[in-house]
Image (cartoon, rainbow, N blue to C red):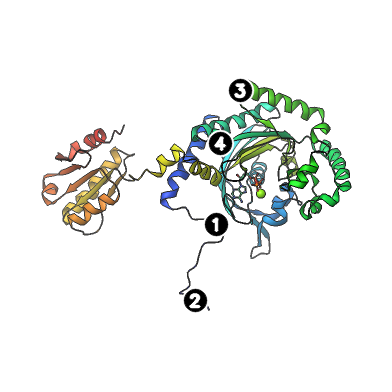
Amino acid sequence: MIKYNTKIQSIRGMHDYLPQDTTIWQYVENTLITILNSYGYREIRFPIVEDTNLFKRSIGEMTDVIEKEMYSFNDRNNKNLTLRPEGTSGCVRAGIEHGLFYKKEQRLWYLGPMFRYERPQKGRYRQFHQFSAEAFGQIGPDIDVELILITARYWKQLGISHHLSLELNSIGSLSSRSNYRKKLITFLEKHSNNLDHNDLRRLYSNPMRILDTKNSKTKELLLHAPMLSDYLDNDSHTHFSELCQLLDLLKIPYTVNPYLVRGLDYYNKTVFEWVTDSLGVKKTICAGGRYDELVQELGGDAVPAVGFSIGLERVILLMQEIDNKAFLDKKNTRIDIDVYLISLGDNAKKYSILLSEHIHSILPSIRLMVHHGKNNIKKQLHSANKHKTRTILIINEKNYLTKTVILKNLQLGTQETLQHDEITERLRHILYIN
Ligand code: ATP
Ligand code: MG
């Protein structure tokens, strides 16, 4: 039996964003949309749910995401589906399905919720939001640099660039990595008594992930381990040094982190992360890299690709943490309405709706709200006040008859009566609307 008096609550690690939160979300999203559009990237949308096999094939079976973080379920037809834990897989699937990559370049972006069954904590949730860009069909380091430049421009516009640093590495081709993998396993086997349970579990399945360990004892051990950079193939080596030269030319500071590997198997050559120390522990805000084999792996042509994903919750947390001006400005935008329209009497009410429609047509960007319900003037003024409105339009029976309206300017403490055809020009002037 369902108990009707128990409250149903949101799922752990999945959050509601209330109107006072969404202003900053829209700002953070729109800022990047504008930048990406200006670089010629176009939006793609694809489902939140995909065939589980898609993620297994692209992300790799021996990864944290596949082993323990996916929300998978059988639908009524016993098909195993998964709430997307990341977007690249679905983006590539959609691109192949619709022939987007056939003999052409594509620069795409998307944003939306991702789902991972992780232990919720600050900056780590079970439903979180990524903003990603992917560029298909270009092999050179110039496109890697373009993506890095876009992210750098974004941090600058948000006012958080001083709190972020860029880490880079090259993880080479699949074949150079398999050479290195053998050397690494041999080395780690010799020191297996120094490895923790988690590292041991990965020793044969995904030893490269051990490079990314958080365990300080393992970290120390790794200082003596063979280095991936010594096993890079020539092509990856050249690609990486060209990338670094371009970044130097563009004066984008970076550090080469030889231990940087990514959590998903599909990456090759360039990998990068933007990290911050300003959220308590070191956190990655944005991660990306090349995945030249993935399109083919998922059944498409051989199409090289590179992309990044930004964790939007972490971006907003960072802005909040450093008392960022843009954040505070957005948070303090309490004036949610430009003009509040109130009326007294039935005829005045009908006229007020007509007038509101007229104003919305002439001044489409105005934020105008009509008071509904049959309240007295005091109540209506009180509601206007709650919306922090500085401009109130009042229509009473007499105004209805003479087709006029009273404009109360709370900023200046003035009041005037305007003719119907004067109203929009006056509002345009007072509210600085173009
Ligand atoms: P981490 O090492 O923090 O688990 P990851 O390597 O799993 O990150 P990616 O798969 O590369 O992360 O995702 C890109 C970005 O998405 C991360 O840098 C982070 O900003 C964000 N992100 C990943 N997982 C979460 C999560 N559970 N909650 C909030 N943001 C997340
Ligand atoms: Mg993770």
* Closer to the camera in the image, 363 or 201: 201
Label 4: few (<14), some or many (≥20) within 10 Å? some
Quadrant of res 144: top right
Upstream in sequence: badge 4 or badge 2: 2
Number of labels in the image equals 4
Q: Distance between the residues labelled 1 and 4?
A: 27 Å
**Type of the residue with mark 4:** His
The residue carrying mark 3 is 250
Question: Residue 3 has which mark?
Answer: 2
Q: How far apart are marks 1 and 2 (CA)?
A: 23 Å
Upstream in sequence: badge 1 or badge 4: 1
* Closer to the camera in the image, 217 or 103: 217
Numbered disc in front, either 2 or 3: 3
Q: Is residue 94 left or right of residue 365?
A: right
- Judge whether 169 appears above or below 199 on screen: above
Are the residues flagged by discs 4 and 2 in contact, CB closer than 8 Å?
no
